[in-house]
Image: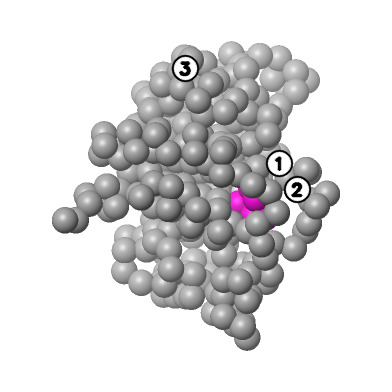
Amino acid sequence: MNDPSRALLRLGTSSWSVDSWVGPFYPAGSQPSQYLSIYAQKYSCVEIDNTFYRIPSSAMVRKWYEDTPPGFIFAAKVPRIITHEKILENCQEDLTAFLKAMEALEDKRGPLLLQFPYFNKNVFPSSDDFLTRLSPFLKKLSHNWRWALEIRNKWWINRRLLDLLREHEMAFALIDQAWIPRIGQLLKKHDPDTTDFIYIRWLGDRKGIEETTTVWDKVVVDRRPDLQEWVTPVRNWLQKSRVVYGFFNNHYAGHAPASLEMFQQMLE
């Protein structure tokens, strides 16, 4: 029997351009120009990391489209000039240029992630100050795209933020990271289901894991107990017919594809 939840589950990794995956993931001898097409034979989506650092050219985005099969989905980070440097102010030209370039993805367009850094009190004294900046920005966002939002100030996760995201049909990005509440703790306090899709990022402890390795060819941290906490929530969201996008970073356990495969097996 076909499982309808499979069509709703989109697991991938945070980037595909990792040279140390040649051997354990990409066939020996694979060239960087081949990585994406090989990746797309294995997984149905990916989160584009390099859009965080610069706005891509339309030609580059079109190449991504052409290197992947029908039905493949790209999620992408919004450029940091918008979220980190200008922090939502005077950035409309940057956002317009980014969206124009990303239009080349056509039917392979997935959610766009507004990933904010941790803000100290010199930037925003409180969550209310951040929301005062955020609210008018969200009102101007194009409804031709799906959006997700990630914050790294754990005390800012509150009803006002989540209700604002619901109002604008934006996903609250759930992250598995060292200083953010674990998913079980979060679900006891809040309902982070703010639109018709779920966006999850398994990030891990970047500083901690880089004390062990900076070569991402194998698992070096046992994250099975942590991943187990996600199984029931993800199953519940799938049963509610939510599309679940989930992306694994190398910093989560040492080798993102292995973490993805482990979680896939847990769900099954």
Q: Which residue is mark 2?
A: 209
Nearer to me, 34 or 217: 217
Q: Which residue is mark 3?
A: 188
Label 1: state its secondary structure. loop
The three-letter code of the residue at mark 1 reads Asp
Q: Quadrant of the N terminus?
A: bottom left
Nearer to me, 223 or 190: 223
Q: Earlier in the sequence, mark 3 or mark 1?
A: 3
Q: Marks 2 and 3: CB-CB under 8 Å?
A: no
Mark 3 to mark 1 CA distance (whole Å): 23 Å
**Identity of the residue drawn at 78% across and 43% down:** 208
Q: Which residue is mark 1?
A: 205
Note whether residue 195 is visible.
Answer: yes
Mark 1 residue crowding within 10 angstroms, few (<14) / some (14–19) / many (20+): some
The three-letter code of the residue at mark 2 reads Ile
- Tell me which segment is drawn in magenta: 249-254
> Relative to residue 210, is residue 165 drawn left or right?
left
Q: Where does the image place residue 250, in percent across and percent down from the top left?
A: 64, 55
Q: Where does the image place residue 153, in percent across and percent down from the top left?
A: 65, 25
Q: Marks 1 and 2: CB-CB under 8 Å?
A: yes
The three-letter code of the residue at mark 3 reads Lys
Mark 2 to mark 3 CA distance (whole Å): 29 Å
**Identity of the residue drawn at 62% across and 23% down:** 154
Q: Where does the image place residue 169, in percent across and percent down from the top left?
A: 36, 31
